Amino acid sequence: MLRWLIVVFLALVLIEGLAPWLRRLGLGRLPGDLRFRLLGREWSVPLASTVVLSLVVGLLLKWL
């Protein structure tokens, strides 16, 4: 359980770092991605994008 929590956290950090590039591809604006303003800063939680990217990476790894 802890291993999956760490993997999800690292995926969210990685996606947040790559957010400007991924938004040009349309990720980060999917119906499951959360975006809100808190304390004068805009926060985003790309849940749906994380699922889509993990499925794509999983399929690529299984295919290769």
Image (cartoon, rainbow, N blue to C red):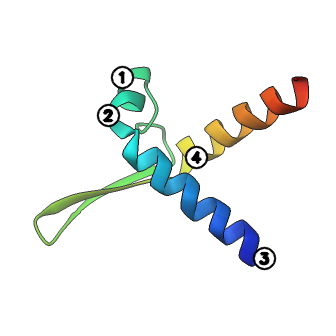
Residues at marks 4 and 3, CA–CA distance in whole angstroms: 18 Å
In this image, 25 relative to 38: left or right? right
The residue where tag 4 is placed is: 50
Query: Disc 2 marks which amino acid?
Result: Pro
Residue 30's spot in the image, x, y percent?
Answer: 48, 37
Q: Using the image, tell me which numbered label, if any, was put on residue 39.
A: none
The residue where tag 3 is placed is: 1
What residue is shown at x 40% (from left), y 37% (from top)?
29
Residue 2's spot in the image, x, y percent?
Answer: 73, 77
The residue where tag 2 is placed is: 20
In the depicted structure, whether residue 6 falls above or below residue 14: below
Residues at marks 4 and 2, CA–CA distance in whole angstroms: 15 Å
Element under disc 3: loop
The residue where tag 1 is placed is: 24
Residue 8's spot in the image, x, y percent?
Answer: 62, 61
In this image, 64 relative to 32: left or right? right
